[in-house]
Amino acid sequence: MASLNTQSRELARKQQIRPLAASLLALAIGLGGAAAHADDALPKLPNKTPLKVGFAQTESNNPWRLAETKSFKDVAAKCGWQVVMTDANGSNSKQVSDIQSMIAQHVDLLVFPPREEKPLAPIVLQAKKAGIPVILVDRDVDQSVAKAGRDYITFIGSDFIDQGHRAADWLVKATNGKAKIIELEGTTGASAANDRKKGFDEVVAKNPGMTIIASQSGDFARDKGRQVMETLLQAHPDVTAVYAHNDEMALGAIAAIKAAGKQPGKDIQIVTIDGTKGGMDAIAAGELGASVQSSPFFGPLACDVAQRYAKGEKIPVWVKVSDRFYDKENVQQSMQYGY
Ligand code: AHR
């Protein structure tokens, strides 16, 4: 069943929903200027330099996360931001307490990728109550608790469902629609894992020759991906394909496949998501079939959104990032996009 988050994004996609705050404002103007109650409005962002910005990272255990953090470090001076950074080391509760401490320090703006959809949703409401505007990047929160345009400015990120569709479409073609697939899922409860699974599984369901024989979380980590793949290979020696929710787990799976005496890219086709340098090298080596890019470069986008928001411009509830796609046809000429 689709999560509320997914349903709401699909609704936004179909109906091009504007921010609720903007709709309330339009309604207020239509009613002769009666403003919405102050408690309902999104907090304002001061138009000042430097702006104190809190960036709460989830973990720093893979190239994707490092590239995301770097993009905020790189943009800080250009954007006039004084950035306070934390690293939750893969813990939801640490990410929540990191953000609580930024709220206590009265940062002007909070920007963060919520590690999981549900545990990180209430802190968005706490920030709003404290009068601090929030921009979510990369992953989203549970829309039944905190809603983009009402409780936080916007979600800046990729269409994870579409990434799953694109990965599955490639695999259908590469296997002529016949595959026994092991799916290595990302962090349980993360919007990236929920939606990448949904998108991929939807396409597989339409192809009777494709079966997901096992699906288990590797927590978006290389070594966990390798361990899970080792175990699943023993239980399912008939596997012919792997779909990993990120490059790091795919690289872990490649190590496990080789250790089991099989050839990745020949005995077992592998498709993944991220477009890291390591993933692109594996495509060039013929071990990985394809990787759907998932851009981690949110710093400049968040800077642009914050500046427009501070000027009073309307911000869409979802600032969608478009992603490239790499396979053996274009990987050599795309190497400059790897990170
Ligand atoms: O949310 C994006 C995912 O999180 C990336 O695919 C992954 O590498 C990261 O840890």
Image (cartoon, rainbow, N blue to C red):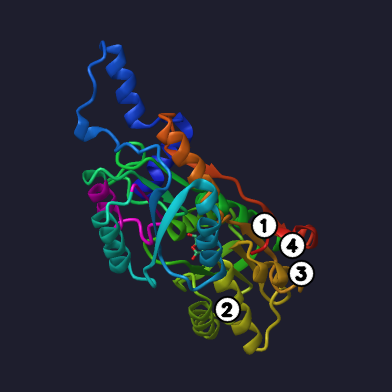
- Quadrant location of the C terminus? bottom right
Q: Earlier in the sequence, mark 2 or mark 4?
A: 2
Mark 1 surroundings within 10 Å by alpha-carbon count, few (fewer than 14), some (14 through 19), many (20 or more): some
Seen at 46% across and 38% down, the residue is 307
Seen at 80% across and 58% down, the residue is 333
The x and y percentages for residue 10 are 44, 40
Q: Earlier in the sequence, mark 4 or mark 1?
A: 1
Q: Which mark is residue 252?
A: 2
Provide the secondary structure element on which disc 3 rests: helix
Nearer to us: label 3 or label 4: 4
**Pointer 4: what residue?**
335
What distance separates the C-alpha of mark 3 from that of mark 2?
17 Å
Provide the secondary structure element on which disc 1 rests: helix
Residue placed furthest toward the front: 49
Provide the secondary structure element on which disc 2 rests: helix
Seen at 34% across and 25% down, the residue is 23
Mark 4 surroundings within 10 Å by alpha-carbon count, few (fewer than 14), some (14 through 19), many (20 or more): some
**Pointer 1: what residue?**
170
Name the side, left or right, on which 301 lies relative to 277: left
Name the side, left or right, on which 133 lies relative to 12: left
**Pointer 3: what residue?**
284
Instruction: Check contact, mark 3 vs mark 2: CB within 8 A.
Output: no
Provide the secondary structure element on which disc 4 rests: helix
What distance separates the C-alpha of mark 2 from that of mark 1?
21 Å
Q: Quadrant of residue 182?
A: bottom right
Is residue 115 located in the magenta-colored stretch of the structure? yes
Q: Earlier in the sequence, mark 2 or mark 1?
A: 1
Instruction: Check contact, mark 2 vs mark 4: CB within 8 A.
Output: no
What distance separates the C-alpha of mark 4 from that of mark 1?
20 Å
What is the three-letter code of the residue carrying label 4?
Met
Q: Is residue 272 above or below residue 146?
A: below
